[in-house]
Image (cartoon, helix red, strand yellow):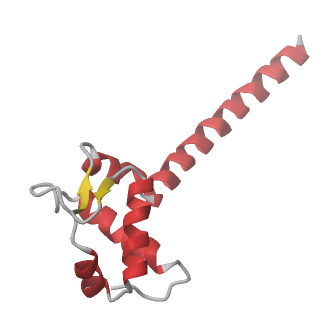
Amino acid sequence: MVEWTGKPAYQQVAEQLRGRIAAGEFAESGKLPSLADLQATYGVTVTVARDAIRQLKTDGLVVSHQGKGAFLTAAASDSARLVGPEVAIAELREQVARLQSEVVELRERVVELEEK
């Protein structure tokens, strides 16, 4: 279900679908629920459901075929784990931590060079 959190409804639906894809829920059939099913499941309009699928297409998780539906890409389950904002935030934190340690090392080198 979509709640008012300040985040657009289509992003909430896309994130929930991304989690379900990462969990392997659609792996057997490879097909995502229809727009009507998404509307019923999440209590959203067809526009929101369509935009959620569009977001997943942009993320490279699904492809859609007119009149057939949306289908998972070959590496969708693995990609879904990597695309989520939590993963991106964790990666950014790791990069910042590495950069901070490199800056500390560089400062120490500069101090050593200035003492010589």
Say which residue appears at 38% left-offset and 86% top-offset.
Answer: 45
Residue 112 position (above or below residue 4):
above
Q: Quadrant of the N terminus?
A: bottom left
Q: Residue at x 28, y 76 (%)?
A: 35
Location of residue 104 (image quadrant) = top right
* Relative vertical location of residue 54 with respect to residue 10 in this rendering, above or below: above
Quarter holding the C terminus is: top right
The answer to which of 37 and 83 lies nearer the viewer is 37
Relative to 82, residue 38 above or below = below
28 lies left or right of 52:
left
Residue 58: quarter of image: bottom left
With 97 as the anchor, is 86 left or right in this view? Answer: left
Q: Estimate the x, y position of residue 27 in percent, counting from the top left.
A: 15, 55
Height in image: 106 above or below 61? above
* Residue sitting farthest toward the left: 28
Number of numbered markers: 0
- x, y (%) of residue 32? 22, 65
Residue drawn at (67%, 39%) of the image: 100
Tell which residue pokes out farthest to the top in this image.
116
Q: Quadrant of residue 95?
A: top right
Pinpoint residue 98: horizontal percent, then vertical percent.
Answer: 59, 36
Residue closer to the observer: 29 or 79: 29
Residue drawn at x 42%, y 53% as measured from the top left? 59
Q: Position of residue 39 (x, y in %)?
A: 30, 84
